[in-house]
């Protein structure tokens, strides 16, 4: 039997949802928990993001900004952020990942709609969020040397790692001014299909870490998905679609590779940390997919400094294992 968090029933009574059924839903890589509520014909989702590990205020702030600017975030019905409670709109069960698992023929239409939603987002002025700056990029790639390298028994040049990333990423900084809102985890498990069809409107979730940064970042998150295979042909077609809609030039594709490598190095570190520190070994199975995408990104000339670091510090047998032998 699942233990319900303390204070849940008091919050639901305050929100006008006393007496409904409560269905716990599977969790993610965070301390957040989710519950589906049913009360007659009414449906809602309950998020518990308890302090001190979580803070629902950024989620509420980003949801309000997205809604005010015509994007489809869940409506907020009631919230007690100091206790970590948020009652929000139920977007249903049609998550893009699950939809495509059952209907692979809908893949192109679903990805076209997801790219078009990013185009819409990127036409807006950036939101009132912190910048995705060099400090943030470097802090994230350090996760690779802090967690992955030790887990593989490697001693690596950490100063050289940071210097290589700084050199590779520096050229894109000017091109992310004034920037766009970057949701940072925009992929098939965080996109809901709201009207029962693959090409329909996109419901957005898991956006609480939004920053202001480069328009290529969320495109990388979508098309180099850590959790779902996206073919090279589909990735190229969706890049072309985005470029046709926005006028993106060659430097955009170079920045896409830069941010692809950056994001994928970060994810390898995060998934290793989840396995080693948080005892969630299921994330290790995703590392080979992420590693393969990172290798493709490292082949771009824009990543030459980082590619040289990898050649010098990550042995070939480790790279061929694609992270699959973490102790």
Image (cartoon, grey):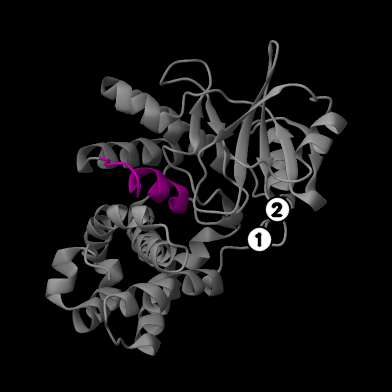
Residue at image point 47% right, 69% down: 140
- Residue 264 lies left or right of residue 230; in this view the side is right
Q: Residue 66: in sight, yes or no?
A: no
Q: Which element type, helix, strand or loop, lies under badge 2?
A: loop
- Residue 59 lies left or right of residue 289; in this view the side is right
Can you say which quadrant of the picture contains the N terminus? top right
Identify the residue at the far front of this view.
Answer: 1
Q: Residue 103, percent across and down?
A: 30, 20
Q: What number is the disc on residue 50?
A: 2
- Residue 299 lies left or right of residue 216; in this view the side is left
**Dividing the picture into quarters, in which one does residue 66 lie?**
top right
Residue at image point 38% right, 24% down: 99
Which sits in the foreground, 195 or 286? 286
Classify 175 as above or below 231: below
Identify the residue at the far right of this view.
Answer: 14
Q: Residue 27: in sight, yes or no?
A: yes
Q: What number is the disc on residue 113?
A: none
- The residue at which mark 1 appears reads as 53
Q: Is residue 197 magenta?
A: no
Q: Which element type, helix, strand or loop, lies under badge 1?
A: loop
Identify the residue at the far top of this view.
Answer: 41
Give the alpha-carbon distance from disc 1 to disc 2, as whole Å. 6 Å
Which sits in the foreground, 241 or 298? 298
Q: Is residue 225 magenta?
A: yes
The range drawn in magenta is 216-230
Can you say which quadrant of the picture contains the C terminus? bottom left
């Amino acid at each position: 039997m699942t233990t319900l968090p303390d204070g849940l029933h008091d919050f639901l009574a305050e929100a006008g949802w006393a007496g409904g059924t409560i269905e716990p839903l599977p969790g993610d890589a965070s301390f957040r928990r989710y519950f589906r509520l049913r009360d007659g014909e009414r449906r809602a989702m309950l998020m518990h993001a308890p302090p001190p590990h979580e803070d629902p205020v950024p989620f509420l702030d980003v949801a309000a900004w997205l809604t005010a600017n015509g994007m489809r975030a869940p409506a907020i019905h009631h919230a007690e952020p100091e206790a970590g409670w948020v009652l929000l709109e139920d977007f249903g069960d049609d998550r893009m990942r699950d939809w495509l698992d059952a209907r692979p023929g809908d893949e192109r239409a679903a990805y076209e709609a997801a790219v078009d939603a990013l185009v819409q987002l990127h036409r807006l002025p950036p939101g009132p969020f912190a910048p995705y700056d060099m400090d943030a990029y470097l802090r994230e790639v350090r996760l690779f040397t802090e967690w992955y390298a030790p887990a593989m028994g490697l001693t690596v040049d950490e100063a050289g790692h940071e210097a290589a990333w700084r050199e590779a990423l520096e050229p894109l900084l000017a091109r992310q001014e004034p920037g766009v809102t970057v949701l940072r985890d925009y992929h098939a498990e965080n996109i809901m299909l709201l009207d029962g069809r693959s090409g329909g409107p996109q419901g957005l979730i898991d956006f609480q870490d939004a920053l202001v940064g480069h328009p290529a970042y969320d495109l990388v998150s979508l098309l180099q998905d850590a959790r779902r295979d996206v073919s090279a042909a589909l990735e190229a077609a969706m890049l072309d679609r985005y470029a046709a809609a926005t006028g993106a030039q060659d430097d955009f594709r170079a920045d896409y590779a830069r941010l692809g490598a950056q994001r994928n190095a970060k994810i390898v570190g995060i998934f290793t940390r989840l396995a080693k520190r948080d005892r969630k070994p299921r994330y290790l199975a995703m590392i080979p997919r992420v590693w393969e995408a990172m290798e493709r990104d490292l082949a771009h000339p824009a990543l030459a400094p980082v590619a040289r670091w990898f050649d010098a510090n990550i042995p070939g047998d480790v790279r061929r294992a694609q992270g699959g032998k973490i102790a």
